[in-house]
Amino acid sequence: MIRINENYTKLKASYLFADIARRVSAFVAAHPDRPVIRLGIGDVTEPLPQVCRDALHAATDELGRRETFRGYGPEQGYAFLREAIAQHDFQARGAQVEPDEIFVSDGSKCDLGQLEEIFAKDIRVAIPDPVYPAYVDTNVMAGRTGGNRDGRYEGLVYLESNAANGYVPAPPAGPVDLIYLCFPNNPTGAVATRAQLTAWVDYAKQHQAVILFDAAYEAFVRDPAIPRSIYEIPGARDCAIEFRSFSKTAGFTGVRCAFTVIPKTLMGYDQAGQPHALHALWNRRHTTKSNGVSYPVQRAAAAIYSDAGKQQTRALTDYYLGNAKLIREALTKLGFNCIGGDNAPYIWVNVQRDSWEFFDLLLNQAQVVTTPGAGFGRCGEGHVRISAFNSRANVETALTRIAAALK
Ligand code: PLP
């Protein structure tokens, strides 16, 4: 008899975005004449930058000629991409990251979901609340939690982000072993200062813990005082792994490319207390379970580091940040306290009532889809997330409708 991984039965039955999709479909079926604007799921809407399209075409043509054809590439990614990443994303900002510390992959969701495999099952895991749901669910699947009680899994340490701490949690009083941090944050749009990240790095070093730093939205940081990488903080090479994605930086949600940085100096420990390089463990895992990312996609990703690529991706993120500014201003004018939207494509709106109730109100009265904060964790209750990923015209129409609906 084939038996299942029973940890899967601990997971909440439906996924947040499936619940939202069901409510939106029901509304659309009942009101086919009232078009809905989606500011819910954080998927990009604007076309792929020209440099990326050109690189995809050129690389595809190379694969069409015998002399330039390529088969399997290096599992960790081509040198041309890893060198460009190390130079432009890190070394240019004073952060020490070497090309061979970078693992190219087809998405941060996969990397974030799978990296937990290299750690022991009985470690203490700290996870923010509210949170990008994949961090929690993958640890549930791995058996690091008990059951779900009142919306929280037994065994996890929740790092509460709320108005009182400016939506940036401080390190916990007691020790933990693995810490998930995400800045700029999804869902709150909050960013962490240098001092706040330094406190986390100091804590992690003190407890021989590892920080998994999700920087999927770093390209939206405009405040020069805000670190874009955890490696801008002294000591982070000894306690942090960083995840980056081309999804939101360059509109790659459908193209798929991301990377993970594991410094060679970063250690984990066996039961006897002997150190092991996490880079070597992940390299072993990655080369066993992956054959890397396609050549044209890696060429398209590398294209964003050219001068034209930098301009085009900046224009893309500026466009969404322009939407974010309009959303935050409009919601603030309507009397809501908001954060995010200045260095992030998400606006976290304190609606001071049940978040699903507010979601339904906007869906039914304004035909605008948001994301109810309760779906991101207990601390998300009382909030909705509004995404800036849409066309300017749709954002403007949505804001006019929201203002009319809330009058
Ligand atoms: N991390 C965060 C915080 C995200 O919001 C997302 C996507 O929405 C991801 C990671 C996943 O990115 P990718 O498209 O590279 O899988």
Image (cartoon, rainbow, N blue to C red):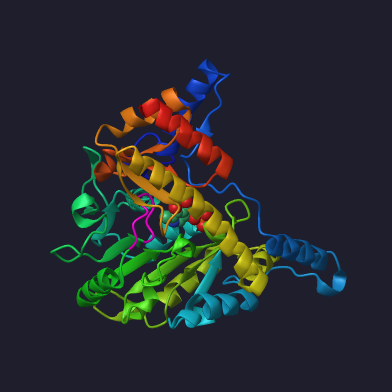
Q: Which residues are magenta?
A: 183-191
The N terminus is located in which quarter?
top left
The spot of residue 266 in percent (x, y) is 36, 79
Horizontally, residue 229 falls left or right of residue 128, namely right
Residue 277 in view here: no
The spot of residue 40 in percent (x, y) is 46, 39
Horizontally, residue 104 falls left or right of residue 187, namely right
Numbered circles on residues, count:
0
The spot of residue 312 in percent (x, y) is 63, 63
Q: Give residue 13's quadrant in the image.
A: top left
Above or below: residue 70 compared with residue 101: above
Above or below: residue 50 compared with residue 374: below
Give the farthest residue toward the left: 173
The C terminus is located in which quarter?
top left
The spot of residue 202 in percent (x, y) is 23, 76
Q: Nearer the viewer, residue 403 or 99?
A: 403
